Image: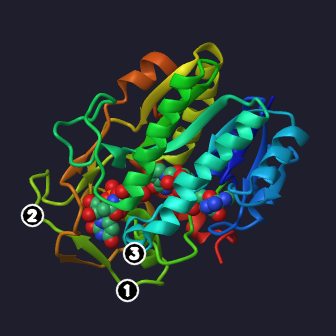
């Protein structure tokens, strides 16, 4: 059974492709390569020992997406393509809505035309806005504080309307918490093409000498040590969550949302400490102002994913840090 992965050569998509192959699904990648490179295909092939197709195209190119759905006899789509930097989205909102919202609409038009009605969407915990209680379950009210977050919420609304209009659709939005780490082979992982803004990629750049120090955004939050707490999840666990969701959608039609997180939060200093232990490197840091838009703590209640998908995260913070570090030191990173 073939699955089309839009944004498939990106960080999360490449790991999802590996997990799909492990479970006997065929993966077809479609990506415009704005934030990834085609050589990831050979890395995935090395890991899975299976051939993989990459269609280089924009998800808004409906004709090409339709042709790909037909040519590869695709039965479901995992839609990861999109732009994801919060700061950029504030500066370039139209680009974000064009990629993330218009991109999804174009994809849905292609899917509808080809009668492919099973979809997993890369959602985000950012749709919960400012946490009103913790841990965050799927019933927590939604809200967004920036164009990136609003684009994710708008897509969820569109998908909900679509499912209401036609009961043949089977759609899930997976609300990712903080994906980190790399595949155990260390052949694929996260190495942003532009300046990273997330914690672990920045720590990697300090560890490899590309940045001189980490700025810790605030140490006066009401948390265990004053620094921000997040639910970091190993990208391979996250990828396996997609396969579990595909299996679920084969049994269940309609609209579904699932948190993909571990349920456990770690502070910036806890992540820093774990990374230093794993790598044996000292990471210089300076405490600076809180980052605008940041919350003190954000972590998932992952109970629904366990109950319905029979999925839960397996890998711990040490594995997250050691795989990320292994990848950062590998010849895959230039
Ligand atoms: P990524 O940038 O590594 O991957 C996204 C891929 O989509 C890239 O390869 C890029 O080239 C491609 N792409 C972008 N716009 C496209 C378009 N219009 N047409 C075709 N391809 C396009 O990012 P990622 O971390 O793998 O994220 C994947 C998805 O998960 C995104 O939708 C993102 O918003 C979501 N998400 C990511 C995180 C995270 O922390 N990484 C957290 C929550 C949600
Ligand atoms: C950020 C985004 C969020 C997005 C998520 C995953 C913001 C405000 N939020 O969330 O919308 O869904 O990434 O892509 O950008 N930190 C530092 N120094 C740094 C970087 C981060 O101290 O240089 C701290 C942050 O204050 C936070 C933690 O590290 O407490 C994690 O930050 P980050 O990796 O950016 O993730 P989020 O803030 O959860």
SS assignment at label 3: helix
> In the image, what residue occupies the spot 62% across and 45% down?
79
Callout 1: helix, strand or loop? loop
Left or right: 39, with 128 as reference point? right
Quadrant assignment, res 78 = top right
Residue 55 image point, x, y percent: 81, 56
Quick check: 310 above or below 315? above
- Asked whether disc 2 touches disc 1, contact meaning CB atoms under 8 Å apart, the reply is no
**Rendered position, 58 above or below 309:** below
**Alpha carbon distance from label 3 to label 1:** 26 Å
| Residue drawn at x 48%, y 84% as measured from the top left | 210
> Which picture quadrant has residue 199?
bottom left
Q: Name the residue under label 3.
A: 91
| Separation of residues labelled 2 and 3 (CA atoms) | 28 Å
Q: How many marks?
A: 3
| Mark 2 and mark 1: Cα distance apart in space | 23 Å
Residue tagged 2: 220
To which residue does mark 1 refer?
Answer: 212
Does residue 273 show up? Answer: no
Decide if ligand 2 comes within 8 Å of the CB at mark 3. Answer: no
């Amino acid at each position: 059974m073939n699955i089309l992965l839009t944004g498939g050569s990106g960080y999360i998509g490449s790991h999802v492709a590996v997990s799909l192959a492990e479970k006997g699904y065929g993966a077809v990648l479609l990506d415009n390569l704005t934030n990834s490179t085609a050589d990831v295909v050979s890395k995935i092939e090395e890991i899975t020992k299976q051939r993989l197709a990459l269609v280089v195209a924009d998800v808004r190119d409906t004709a090409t997406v339709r042709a790909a759905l037909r040519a590869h006899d695709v039965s479901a789509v995992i839609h990861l393509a999109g732009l994801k930097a919060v700061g950029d989205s504030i500066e370039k909102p139209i680009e974000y809505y064009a990629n993330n919202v218009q991109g999804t609409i174009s994809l849905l038009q292609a899917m509808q035309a080809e009668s492919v009605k099973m979809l997993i969407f890369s959602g985000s915990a950012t749709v919960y806005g400012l946490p009103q209680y913790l841990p965050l379950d799927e019933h927590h009210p939604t809200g967004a504080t920036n164009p990136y977050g609003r684009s994710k919420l708008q897509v969820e609304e569109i998908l909900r309307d679509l499912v209401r209009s036609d009961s043949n659709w089977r759609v899930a939005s997976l609300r990712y918490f903080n994906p980190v780490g790399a595949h155990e082979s260390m052949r694929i992982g996260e190495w942003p093409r532009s300046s990273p803004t997330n914690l672990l990629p920045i720590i990697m750049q300090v560890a490899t000498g590309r940045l001189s120090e980490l700025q810790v955004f605030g140490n006066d939050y009401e948390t265990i040590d004053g620094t921000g707490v997040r639910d970091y999840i190993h990208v391979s666990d996250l990828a396996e969550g997609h396969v579990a969701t595909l299996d679920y959608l084969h049994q269940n039609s309609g609209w579904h949302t699932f948190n993909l997180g571990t349920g456990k939060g770690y502070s910036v200093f806890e992540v820093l400490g774990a990374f230093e232990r794993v790598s044996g490197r000292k990471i210089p840091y300076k405490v600076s102002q809180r980052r605008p838009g940041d919350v003190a703590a954000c972590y998932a209640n992952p109970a629904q994913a366990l109950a319905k998908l029979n999925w839960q995260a397996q890998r711990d913070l040490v594995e997250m840090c050691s795989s990320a570090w292994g990848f950062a030191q590998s010849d895959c990173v230039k």
